[in-house]
Image (cartoon, rainbow, N blue to C red):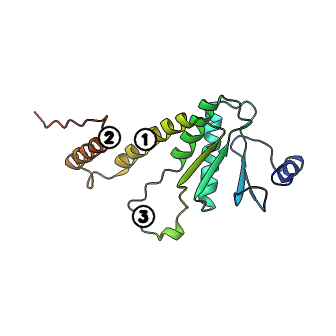
Amino acid sequence: RALGGAIARLVEAGEIRGGKEQVTVLHADGGVRAKRVAVVGLGKSPGPAEVRLAAAAAVRAASAARARSVAFALDGVPLDAAEATRCAVDGAALAGYRFTRYLTAPADERPGEVGSLAVLGGDRAQARISAVLTEATNRARDLQNTPSRDMGPEELADRARELAKQHSTLTARVHDRA
């Protein structure tokens, strides 16, 4: 309703079919605060994996459009609020990962980076937990993607110590060769 029936017309015309990971981006000319609205298909019998993949597809579309923020509306997602939130945050954060340390192309030639994520109708506590877990996963991906010439054993040990200093619940113990 907020888009003046645009989504319903596109469904009726067959342009939005609800197919798994199908993304249709509409420019919002009023009715909502967003500049664009993406409608993402979940497929015929969606479960957690389909919600995660849909969130990932939405973030990739947002990055391609150089959007800086994404909001997910979870009404109609056939999961409880906590699980839907977890899947949306996981899919979005993991799909938004980019290892850019060695890129030389100017920033305006690279895909955009979504820096803000909101989950409407979600579970706030679950969103925080999922954000922490996906951030840790993406940090691990950075370590994995860094060549050994730049991240040898000593540098890896230093990084572990840095992380332990930043988080009171984490300790780092570095063992030398026997």
- Provide the residue designation for mark 1: 137
Residue 5 rendering spot, x and y as whole percentages: 87, 51
The C terminus lies in quadrant: top left
Q: Earlier in the sequence, mark 3 or mark 2?
A: 3
Which secondary structure lies at badge 3? loop
What is the CA distance from the residue labelled 1 to the residue labelled 2?
Answer: 15 Å
Q: Residues within 10 Å of mark 3 (few under 14, many from 20)?
A: few
- For marks 1 and 2, give the one nearer the viewer: 2
| Residue 103 to residue 116: above or below | below
The disc labelled 2 sits on which kind of residue?
His
- Residue that numbered label 2 is attached to: 167
Q: CA distance from mark 1 to mark 3?
A: 21 Å
Query: What is the spatial separation of the Cα atoms under label 3 and label 2, in whole angstroms?
Result: 29 Å
Q: Quadrant of residue 44?
A: top right
Task: From the image, state whether disc 3 or disc 2 is nearer to you.
Answer: 2
What secondary structure is marked by label 2?
loop
Task: Name which of mark 1 and mark 3 comes first in the sequence.
Answer: 3
Question: Percent from the top left, x then y, of residue 176?
Answer: 13, 37
Q: Is residue 87 above or below residue 118?
A: above
Q: Left or right of 168: which side holds 85?
A: right
Q: What is the tally of numbered marks visible in this picture? A: 3
Is 118 placed left or right of 31 in the picture?
A: left
Disc with the residue nearer the chain's start (1 vs 2): 1
Which residue was labeled with disc 3? 103
Q: Does the CB distance between marks 3 and 2 fall below 8 Å?
A: no
Find residue 35 and report its image quarter.
Answer: bottom right
* Other residues around mark 2 within 10 Å, as few (<14) / some (14–19) / many (≥20): few
Question: Viewer-proximal residue, 15 or 36?
Answer: 36
